Every structure is written in structure tokens, then in C-alpha cells.
Amino acid sequence: MAPLTPLLATPLLAQLSETRARLQQFERALTMTFGLLHDLLERLESKLGPGFLSPELARLAEGTSSGREEVAEIDALIKQGQQPKAARLVRELGGITWDEALALIARWHSYTVEQRLRWVQLARWLKMMSSPATPPRTEE
């Protein structure tokens, strides 16, 4: 296959840039939606009692935080030259492979703090939603 000529490459690069911007908008919207869902579930549970939420909704309510502590920890590990430990943390947070974690750590400095926070929040949500729900404990 012949390489793309500059005339063909320019529209493709423009499309890629537009797609990247649109994806970032979706990520921001999804993060905001999860945050609002978490707030709503917390308020419902506080008003209607701890047994009100189904196990799935209770799990969603538990699984969120701002992600600031995790991002600060990853930043500190990278700054200290401890990329393998940072990759392990990223791997545990996101439920991703070692290769994916190492690639993310290699690019970590290129992301803004907002993008890092979004990644931590979304990774946590995706991991939680893909793991099976644990049945609620019952007291006998």
C-alpha cells in the first residue's frame, strides 16, 4: 500500500483531531454524569435508609472518589523514578494489563491533571461495573 499523499493526510489529521476533541468531551460528560449519579445515590440512601439501594446501586455509590489521592500518588512515584510501582497502582486501579499500564505511565506526564483525574475516575467505574456484584450481607 502506498503512503498517503499530503493532500489525503491533511483531512485525515483534521478528522483525528476532531475525533480526539469529541472523545474528550464525552469523557468529561461521562465523568460528570457518574459524579451526579453518585451524589444522587448518596442522598437517596441518607434519606431513605441504608437498605434502600439495590446491591448494584449501593456498589456504584461506594465506588467513587475524586481520584486526587491516587493521581498524587502516581505522580510522586513517577517523580521518584518508581515507574514499576506506579504501573502496578495504575494496573490495580484500572484493571488493565501490564503493557497498558506501562504505556500509560510512559505518557502520564503529557496529560493534564484533569485528564489524569478523569482517567482514574473512569477506570474505577469501568472496573467496578465489569466485576460481578457481591450479594449483600445478611445478619442471622
Image (tube, helix red, strand yellow):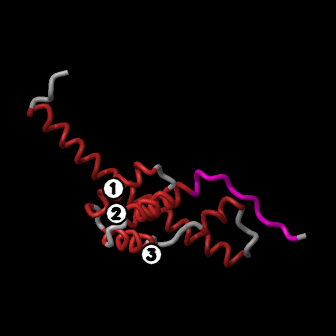
* Residue type indicated by callout 1: Gln
Name which residue type carries label 2.
Answer: Gln
Report the residue at 46% width, 59% height from top.
122
On-image quarter of the C terminus? bottom right
**SS for callout 3:** helix
Q: Distance between the residues labelled 2 and 1?
A: 9 Å
Residue 59 place in picture, x, y as percent: 64, 63
Dot 2 and dot 1 residues touching (CB under 8 Å): yes
Tell me how many marks there are: 3
Q: Name the residue under label 2.
A: 115
Is 40 on the left-hand or right-hand side of 104? right
Q: Earlier in the sequence, mark 2 or mark 3?
A: 3
Q: Is mark 2 on a helix, strand or loop?
A: helix
Q: Residues within 10 Å of mark 3 (few under 14, many from 20)?
A: few
Residue at image position (58%, 57%) is 128
Q: What stretch is highlighted in magenta?
A: 128-139
Residue identified by numbered label 3:
69
The answer to which of marks 3 and 1 sits earlier in the sequence is: 1
Spatial separation of the CA atoms under disc 2 and disc 3: 14 Å
| Residue 24: assigned label | 1
Residue 80 lies, in percent from the top left, at: 33, 72
Callouts 2 and 3 close, C-beta under 8 Å: no
